Amino acid sequence: MDTNDTKLTNRRRRAAREFLMQLVYQMGMTNDFSDAARKTFLDEHATEITSACPDFKYFNHYLAAVTGNLTEIDEIIQDASEHWKIRRIAKVDLAILRLAAAEMLYPQAKNPIPRKVSINEAVELAKKFGGDKSPAFVNGVLGKIADR
């Protein structure tokens, strides 16, 4: 794969990661992690998603990883986020943590994402969508998950 292909793949994956984080956030807000919720989200954002050309293999794999392993992911986040109960974590931060934890715990067979990349991308999402303290919080929790 040449440099231009790698850049395009990274751009598509970043777009997919951002849309997926937004979906996981919405699912967390409504406490609805169903396929119907996924379909509604994709229908509502079809134009944006199509124009961004996200990586749908990534999107589908990690959506299934989050929704299929939510209890385990939340337990791992809970253990790594000392003194913070899941219900107290800001919903945006929780969505970012769930997605990044899924990337680290349930990698794709082909093209697994290095843990360092998952953490860096999550911190960037926290900078874009979270509060002032979100990047440091996300980085700290994910660092503990990566070290386990």
Image (tube, helix red, strand yellow):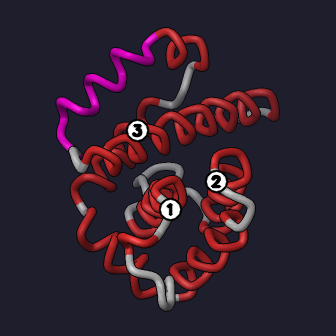
Q: Is residue 49 above or below residue 74?
A: above
- Evaluate if marks 2 and 1 touch, with contact meaning CB atoms under 8 Å apart: yes
* Front-lying residue, 37 or 14: 37
Is residue 23 placed above or below 136 in the rendered structure? above
Q: Amino acid at mark 2?
A: Gly
Figure disc tally: 3
What amino acid does circle 1 point to? Ala
Q: Position of residue 28 (x, y in %)?
A: 33, 51
Q: Is residue 70 visible?
A: yes
- x, y percent for residue 143: 62, 79
| Quadrant into which the N terminus falls | top right
Spatial CA span between label 2 and label 3: 15 Å
The disc, 2 or 1, on the residue closer to the chain's N-terminal end is 1
Query: As drawn, which residue projects farthest toward the front?
Result: 88
Q: Nearer the viewer, residue 145 or 85?
A: 85
In the image, is residue 42 part of the stretch drawn in magenta?
yes
125 versus 15 height, above or below: below
Query: In percent of the image, x 22 and y 56: which residue is there?
Result: 68
Which residue in the structure is indicated by mark 2? 130
Magenta stretch?
A: 33-46
Which structural element holds mark 1? loop
Residue 141 is left or right of residue 78, and the answer is: right
> Disc 1 designates what residue?
90
Provide residue 104's location: percent of width, then percent of height: 49, 67
Q: Which residue is mark 3?
A: 23
In 3D space, how far apart are the residues under numbered discs 3 and 1 (Cα atoms)?
Answer: 15 Å
Dominant secondary structure of the magenta stretch?
Answer: helix
Mark 2 surroundings within 10 Å by alpha-carbon count, few (fewer than 14), some (14 through 19), many (20 or more)? some
